[in-house]
Image (tube, coloured by chain):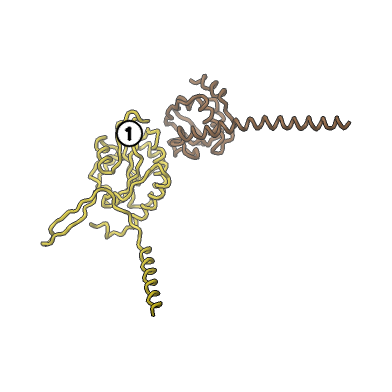
Chain colours: A yellow, B brown
């Protein structure tokens, strides 16, 4: 009888473990969060409010106006670069090209590359850059806008340090991060865009995020 | 008679040793250029031209076109030092973006040229410091 009890415990433990491993992997929600208490139907309800990407407005390589609303139905990856950058940008975009080729036929996925040198990187310059990179269609947008707006978006919302520095090669320093954002504009992953292993990890995470059920999205 | 035969063998042997030693010295020199060149490539060239010299689409030319490298071998040191602008054609594709200047010493230029010319499928032999110095004097 005693043996039977032990066997029962063992089976429960094993089945509990198996159950856990069947749970689908979900990505963490990054950035700051705060608790918000409000009254709904006479009851006090506390909700977690996650940091989201602020509204923005830029122009893409086709001259089309792109706002945060253009991405309401998409998950996306954002990065910061400039076309004349001799240091890490070619590495980042060599890696991003792999991401583009993996997801270019996926409807609800986009890549946003913000130029941090809008003075040089006009719309025609960005178009030429995209053409030479081999990017067509509307999966990968190269965005140009006011320098201050881009810097503010980068520093305050994508947590990326993008600062003017005339002593660095190309006149700018920047961090080379790829930031993964979900349909609710929450940050779900930050990756070193110069490291092929981290970019492979990101490709896996994008698949996980694309598979996230819709009921999580409607909030 | 016996002495003569031994002498001939000795002659042959020393000739073989001599040639082997020469070759060995040359290959030691080549290896030194090549391995130093590999480090210089990582520091100055790899971000743009790639780990395997593959370049980047139509933006950055690859370093895999042996014919281009051979035809321009006496200009490569100048391209590296002063940068390169204007249209070039290699691997059957056109490129017209600018390569920035890299202020390398003649020895470093010789080493990195040796590395590039013997990697990524290229087999174009050693470029010595003397060669690089004389090429650099003729830069436009």
Q: Is residue A161 left or right of residue B16?
A: left
Q: Is residue A201 left or right of residue A216?
A: right
Viewer-proximal residue, A146 or A124?
A: A146
Q: Position of residue A151 (x, y in %)?
A: 27, 37
Q: Position of residue B134 (x, y in %)?
A: 55, 20
Residue depicted at x 33% and y 32%: A172
| The image quarter in which residue A79 lies | top left
| The image quarter in which residue A97 lies | top left
Residue depicted at x 56% and y 29%: B71
Viewer-proximal residue, B4 or B51?
A: B4
| Other residues around mark 1 within 10 Å, as few (<14) / some (14–19) / many (≥20) | many
Dot 1 falls on a residue whose secondary structure is loop
Residue projecting furthest to the bottom: A1
Q: Is residue A199 left or right of residue B53?
A: left
| Vertical arrangement, residue B24 with respect to residue B131, above or below | below
The residue that label 1 is drawn on is A121
């Amino acid at each position: 009888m005693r043996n039977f009890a032990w066997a029962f415990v063992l089976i429960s433990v094993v089945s509990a473990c198996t159950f856990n491993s069947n749970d689908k992997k979900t990505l963490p929600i990054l950035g700051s969060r705060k608790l918000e208490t409000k009254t709904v139907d006479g009851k006090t309800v506390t909700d977690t409010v996650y940091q989201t990407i602020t509204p923005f407005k830029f122009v893409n390589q086709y001259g089309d106006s792109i706002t945060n609303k253009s991405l309401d139905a998409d998950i996306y990856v954002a990065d910061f670069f400039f076309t004349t950058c001799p240091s890490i940008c070619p590495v980042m975009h060599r890696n991003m090209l792999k991401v583009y080729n993996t997801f270019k036929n996926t409807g609800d996925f986009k890549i946003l590359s913000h130029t941090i040198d809008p003075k040089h990187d006009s719309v025609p310059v960005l178009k030429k850059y995209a053409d030479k990179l081999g990017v067509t269609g509307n999966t990968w947008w190269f965005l140009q806008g006011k320098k201050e707006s881009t810097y503010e978006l980068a520093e305050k919302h994508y947590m990326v340090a993008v600062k003017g520095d005339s002593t660095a090669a190309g006149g700018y320093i920047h961090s080379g991060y790829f930031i993964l954002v979900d349909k609710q504009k929450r940050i779900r992953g930050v990756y070193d865009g110069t490291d092929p292993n981290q970019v492979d990890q990101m490709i896996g995470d994008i698949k996980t995020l694309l598979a996230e059920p819709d009921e999580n999205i409607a909030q | 008679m016996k002495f003569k035969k031994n002498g001939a063998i000795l002659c042959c042997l020393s000739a073989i040793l001599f040639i082997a030693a020469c070759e060995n010295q040359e290959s030691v020199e080549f290896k030194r250029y090549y391995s130093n060149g590999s480090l210089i490539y990582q520091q100055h060239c790899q971000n743009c031209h790639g780990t395997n010299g593959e370049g980047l689409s139509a933006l950055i030319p690859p370093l895999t076109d042996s014919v281009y490298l051979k035809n321009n071998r006496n200009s490569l040191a100048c391209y590296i030092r002063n940068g390169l602008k204007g249209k070039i054609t290699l691997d059957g594709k056109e490129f017209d973006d600018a390569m920035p200047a890299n202020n390398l010493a003649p020895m470093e230029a010789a080493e990195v040229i040796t590395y590039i010319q013997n990697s990524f499928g290229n087999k174009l032999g050693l470029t010595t410091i003397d060669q690089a110095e004389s090429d650099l004097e003729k830069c436009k």
